[in-house]
Amino acid sequence: MTSWETRSWISRISAPSKCPDAIPHVFNLRFVLLLWMVLGASASLAETIRAAERPNIVYILCDDLGYGDVRYLNPQGKIPTPHMDRVGREGMAFTDAHSSSAVCTPSRYSLLTGRYNWRSRMKHGVLNGYSPRLIEPGRATVASFLRDHGYATACFGKWHLGMNWAQNDGSAPGSSANAKKVDYTKPIEGGPNAVGFDYFFGISASLDMAPYVYIENDRATEIPTVEKEWYRKGPAGPNFEAIDVLPVVTTKATDYIRTHAAAAKQGNPFFLYLPLTSPHTPILPTAEWQGKSGLNTYGDFVMQTDAVVGQVLEALDQQGIADTTLVIVTSDNGCSPSANYAELLARDHNPSHLYRGTKSDIWEGGHRVPFLVRWPAQVKAGSFSDQLTGLNDFFATCAEMLGQPLPDTMAEDSVSLLPALLGRANAPRRESLVHSAIFGALSIRQGMWKLIFAADSGGWTDPKPGSPAAATLPRLQLYDLSRDIGESRNLESEHPDVVTKLTQLMERTIADGRSTPGAPQPNTGDVTLYSTRAGQAVKAATAGDVKLP
Ligand SMILES: [Ca+2]
């Protein structure tokens, strides 16, 4: 029985109202038998964990780090990444892992909620630094779930999921995205503290988005009295400098490990979510790293990002909690064109590795991400997994790790990776996985088939959505990734049966409001399967959504 099926039955157990009273007797017997089998299967995994103790969890989310930037996954890569390589060497590397979106905000939504981003109100684009909260009030996150089960929870770094800045004209917080109306002296509602984090220190959105101030819990640490510019001009604190953010956040995060290690050893584990601001723009390596890669400033910044991973590992080692801490290192989307691919390719380094496209695109370069998991107490060192997985699977993985059932209203698109991590996966866990691109294009993977509901890249790579070139192409793209990992040969006209089957699967996935077994759930706003949005349309999009540079 797969964990996917396990979850189905556990969900039913947790929601007895979903089991009709009038089910036939024979079904009752089958149900009891299955219940016994499921509880037995589930308990065996949970017991394994209990025997070891619940792990601390450190989730390092790099920003725009490409699959090909990690040397362990791309031996031809030209950027030294010794610390990420160590995580892989001492743990498990996933080679078919995906962010749910090809851009920042939506991927973070899926990571924390276990629900596909396109079910939220955000159908395209990303938030800015003043956008109101995206995670729906009342919705559980993996952080609130872990906190409810005894974890100390903290987030350090780039939030980028919206927060409700107080307005100085008396309007409700979150009712406006107007920077000029923000009252920085007031508490910020709807931020990390509101969705499950005991503690937060970081910035509102990307490091090139105002306001340029640090936020501690629900307060700005200084009033932005000046203007500064990192790609975008905006209100800034006099003491805030973008180049300092990565080192400052790293110090705070490693201090957190040091101050929570003693409690962790006594059975009070922590969840440390560390969404880094790098190697996203502004590409600002500190003096120590400038010129180090011999490639370009992006290469230097990746090296500095890797060193952050090293500092976290070192803190765990020093505190003697490395064995009982689950460390994940991954990225929220593929590498951005801002890295300067031309410069990097000229030096034989391809951040997208074998994959077509970049951040923003529906092709693999947009969303196939490095995904390394180290947990010495449980995960076999030096192991690899080719299981299809998404960052949205983290929530169900934690739930199964704790032996806790997920109600139907939580983590609707999350499938536990625990069997894979424990080396007990003898079959794929996922039936399918949906990807999304910056302008709202969707695609679905099943096995090695990938059907894209768009004619174009869905993002910034040519042919762009709405371009004359895109208008000449078939409306759909179908690729067989087992033979064509570079998505170069569109097979949609040769395999109409596959197109039909995957289209029906996608339609059902949308209509059910979930992709895991359980009671159907509503989407937040209508979902458009065949996106017709082009870049221009996004510029005039809903307030609070902005296009990236
Ligand atoms: Ca990103």
Image (tube, helix red, strand yellow):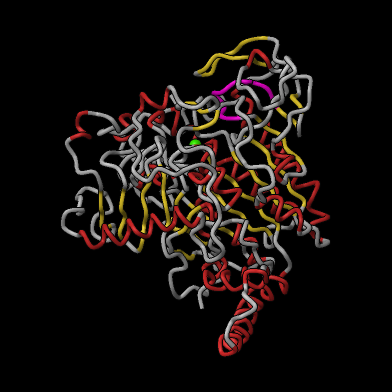
Relative to 461, say whether 149 is above or below.
below
Relative to 262, say whether 216 is above or below.
above
In the picture, residue 395 is in which quadrant? Answer: bottom right
Q: Which residue, as the protein is rendered here, is positioned at the far front?
A: 22
Residue 238's spot in the image, x, y percent? 70, 13
Q: Main secondary structure of the magenta part?
A: loop
Q: Left or right: 205 with respect to 454?
A: right
In the picture, residue 357 is in which quadrant? Answer: top left
Residue 547's spot in the image, x, y percent? 45, 27
| Number of residue marks | 0
Q: Is residue 276 magenta?
A: no
Between 310 and 40, the one lying in front of the other is: 40
Q: Residue at x 69, y 67 (%)?
A: 404
Relative to 375, say whether 137 is above or below.
above
Quadrant where the C terminus is found in the figure: top left
Q: Residue at x 58, y 69 (%)?
A: 7
The region drawn magenta spans 205-214
In the picture, residue 109 is in which quadrant? Answer: top right
Q: Residue at x 39, y 55 (%)?
A: 507
